Image: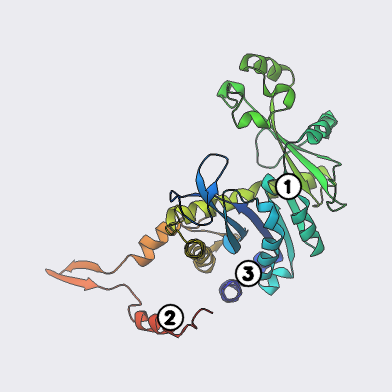
Amino acid sequence: MHTTALDLLAQVDPDRAEQLTADVTIDLDTTDVEVYGRLKQGVAFNHQGQRVARPHVATWADTAVVLAADLGSGRDDPRATSAELFHRALAALPAQARAGRVRVRADAGYFAGQLARAALFVGVEFAIGARRIAPLWRILDGVAADGWTDAIDMTGAQVAVADYCPNWWPAATQLLIRRVRLDLDHGQVSGDPRARRRRTLHPAQRALPLDDLATVAKVDGVFAYSFIVTNLDVSTPAAAAQAEYWYRHRTKVENLFRDTKHGAALRHLPSGHLAVNRAWMWGALLAATTSGWLHHLTARTRDGRLVGHGVRGGQAMIATLRRRLITIPARLVRHARGLTLRLPPGEHLLAEVLARVRALPAPS
């Protein structure tokens, strides 16, 4: 599918096709789908106490399409199968895309060496979020005051680089640190010590009440910290800022999850059988993939950027496409004291599409 769509794009917009294949980003992430059937296969309780299945998805970030996916339970650790999923995603890329620069990024749920080594062995650069463990806080304390540089397009954020290579990780691995200054006057830190934002604070500040934090903020500032392990070029402050800026856009995959849940029924998995739910998941992911390629094939470019009527770089949501392109059986027009039923264009395609569907080979 991706090869065919890219070939079509090369005919419609060669410059856009070349841009997409010159620099490819693969995102890995998971999302939980809550279910309620006690006897459903392949589900388990997650740490929030919800009974869930867990789609594990690899996407081509720049096109918002899915390359590979698995369906696990709420207890499945994505690190265990991340390398295998990454290889499948890489194989799903069109050949011209694999020939260009390929990078992979993932959040702290993948903080283990398997994915990094898998990327290294095939010449792919990686950036993986690191858990906020004690060794990283000690490294942070050793960063010089002048070692920080301003982040790109993020107010109050700075980045720094430190030497850190966990055991069994590629030798070129380094630690990229981002800190964001928090404004206590605007409620950016909760008084609840269990709050999620509190976990991003320095351990020496994490348990302080708000009054004490306010005193610290006036002297040293209060920051939220994030850690990234990467083999990208971070040799200069500008390169480090660019690497962090690229990694920050990993959240594009969250838009795809939102679209599949609200536009393609991935908010639930209806069957008690794992195979049926896996097919349901793929139906939703294929809808998102079709939506992504449709956007690239039909949107007009202006100054090298896609434009459209949607909120995600112009890309419309699946629900919008369904309403505007699919659920239009006919239009009733009143003209010259008469009513005319105008069918949508392409009504002759029904017989052709049905014949092609029937000609598909039976599943093995």
Q: Earlier in the sequence, mark 2 or mark 1?
A: 1
Tag shown at residue 111? 1
Dot 1 or dot 3: first in sequence order is 3
The total number of labels drawn is: 3
Q: Which residue is mark 3?
A: 17
- Say which amino acid is labelled 3: Ala
Label 3 SS:
helix
Query: Which of 330/70 is in front?
Result: 70
Seen in the picture, residue 340 relative to 55 is either above or below; the reply is: below
Q: Is residue 79 left or right of residue 47?
A: right
- Residue sitting at 34 percent across and 75 percent down? 345
Which residue is nearer to you in this view: 113 or 105? 113
- Give the percent coordinates (x, y) of residue 205: 71, 22
Q: CA distance from mark 1 to mark 3?
A: 33 Å
- Mark 1 crowd level (few <14, some 14–19, many ≥20, 10 Å Cα): some
- Residue with the mark numbered 2: 357
Work out how far the residue at label 2 is from the one at label 3, CA to CA, in angstroms.
29 Å
User: Does the image show residue 312?
Assistant: no
Q: Residue 218: give x, y in percent of width and height.
A: 69, 17
**Residue type pointed to by label 2:** Val
Circle 3 residues within 10 Å: few <14, some 14–19, many ≥20: many
Q: Residue at x 31, y 66 (%)?
A: 328
Relative depth, front residue between 243 and 128: 128
Residue 299: which numbered mark, if any? none
Distance of label 2 from label 1 (alpha carbons): 43 Å
Q: Give the x, y percent position of residue 95.
A: 69, 74
Residue 104, image quadrant: bottom right
